[in-house]
Image: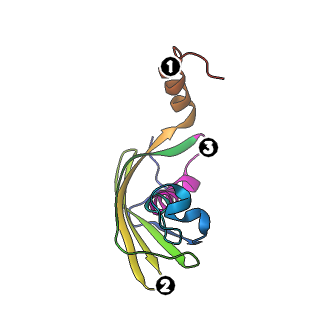
Amino acid sequence: MKFSAVQVGMSKTIQKEITEKDTALHYGSGSIEDLLATPVLAALMIEAAVSTVDPLLPDGYITIGRYLSIEHLEPTTKGMTVTVKAEITEIDNNRINFIIMAYDELGEIGKGIHERFIVNHDLLRQKVNNRTKNLEPRP
């Protein structure tokens, strides 16, 4: 299926004020109580990529992540605002590549590349069900 609404060069920018819940100490990725956790930066990058594509897809289709590589370059403190921009750099059938940049009020804080695939939600659920059907039920 061709997804013509999704084009190279499209981008989306999101913003988030960093709170205590976004810090390394709270997130479990370190002991510093007032700095942005790297896993939160990664999640913001993924969110920016998803928001670039998913709203443009036909009903029943979503994107799923396959690859993410980031560099967390500078510290950002609680109370600052992080701005993340994801831009589509390549589309190959249902594979979409992004370049992602992250900034705070003082400049660039991170960058990365991300790969997502457009998939049919129902077919993905079938694959999950087939893969997990022999697992013991969990409480």
Give the answer, above or below, for where 80 lies relative to 7: below
Examine the image and state in which quarter residue 125 appears: top right
Name the one closer to the observer, 107 or 113: 107
Q: In the picture provided, is 127 more to the left or to the right than 108?
A: right
The x and y percentages for residue 67 are: 36, 48
What distance separates the C-alpha of mark 3 from that of mark 2?
Answer: 37 Å
- Whether the magenta-drawn stretch holds residue 112 is answered as no
Q: Quadrant of the N terminus?
A: top left
Q: Which residue is mark 1?
A: 130
Q: Which residues are magenta?
A: 41-60
Q: In the picture provided, is 22 more to the left or to the right than 96?
A: right
Which kind of residue does numbered mark 2 sit on?
A: Glu
Q: Secondary structure at mark 3?
A: loop
Give the answer, above or below, for where 85 lies relative to 57: below
What distance separates the C-alpha of mark 2 from that of mark 1?
Answer: 47 Å
Q: Nearer the viewer, mark 3 or mark 1?
A: 1
User: In the rendered structure, which disc, 2 or 1, sits on the residue that comes first in sequence?
Assistant: 2
Which label number is shown at residue 59?
3
User: In the rendered structure, which disc, 3 or 1, sits on the residue that comes first in sequence?
Assistant: 3
Q: Secondary structure at mark 2?
A: loop
Which kind of residue does numbered mark 1 sit on?
A: Asn
Which label number is shown at residue 105?
2
The structure's colour scheme is rainbow
